[in-house]
Image (cartoon, helix red, strand yellow):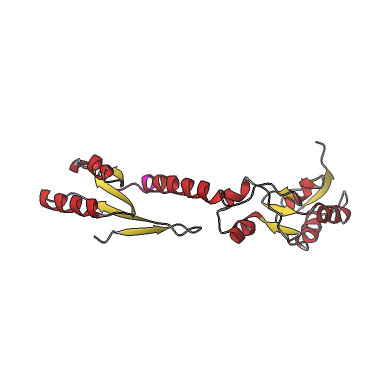
Amino acid sequence: MIPDFAFDYQYADFRVYFEVMGFWTPEYVEKKLGQLASVEDVELIVAVDESLGVGEEIEAEDHRAIPYSSTVRVKDVVDVLREYEADLTAAAGDDIPAELRPDADVIELGDVAAEHGVATDVIDERTFPEHTRVGQWLIRPDVLTEIESELAVGDGFDEAEAIISEYGVTDAGAVLSAVGYRVAWDGLSGGTLEERSD
């Protein structure tokens, strides 16, 4: 049997196949069920027309059945794929230490995840003792202190954003908040830095 589609998980060697089983003759249905029964050691999702009434037989063969009527809903397929992803993400976290210490002074969480070959969700739950989490970035405290020393109340947002980007960070708003500033916007023309009151 050659399935209709295959989905590969980006962060692990995992593939799940997808087969659509529509309305056909009783002979075709029996043949297809026989093929599904012979498939072993493969993750398989089968979208099955409700009128066939064979969803339970498919699941009895350890495959996931998605019942449909007239069309297969993409949301139903995505929901099943997310279940697989949740299991894979949880398993990937088993090999990652609870504390991570990236070498870079400034690094995006997505890059840390890529270095470990996992999804960003896995990295989200880790601590970074040598860095401060600023939005989706990890920045060493001394770098934040340097950035703060280059900023002042009344500076324009564009100027502040340029200073922050020199350190390799693209989320100026998160950095400004981390160092005690907020932006007072003046329409669409720009804004100026103010001290945060909280």
Outermost residue toward the top? 198
Residue drawn 43% across the image and 57% down it:
14
The answer to whether residue 70 shows anywhere in this view is: no
- Give whichever of 95, 120 is nearer the camera: 95
Residue drawn 84% across the image and 45% down it:
194
The answer to whether residue 25 is left or right of residue 59 is left
Residue drawn 33% across the image and 54% down it:
41
Give the prevailing secondary structure in the magenta stretch.
helix
Image quarter (top left, top right, bottom left or bottom right) of the N terminus? bottom left
Question: Looking at the image, how many numbered discs can be counted on the residues?
Answer: 0
Q: Quadrant of residue 17?
A: bottom left
Picture coordinates of residue 63, whole percent (x, y): 30, 47
The magenta stretch spans which residues? 72-76
- Give whichever of 101, 72 is nearer the camera: 101
Picture coordinates of residue 135, whole percent (x, y): 69, 48
Is residue 113 placed above or below 177 in the rendered structure? below
The answer to whether residue 39 is left or right of residue 96 is left
Picture coordinates of residue 180, whole percent (x, y): 82, 44
Asked if residue 170 is among those painted magenta in the image, a careful observer would answer no
Picture coordinates of residue 137, whole percent (x, y): 69, 53
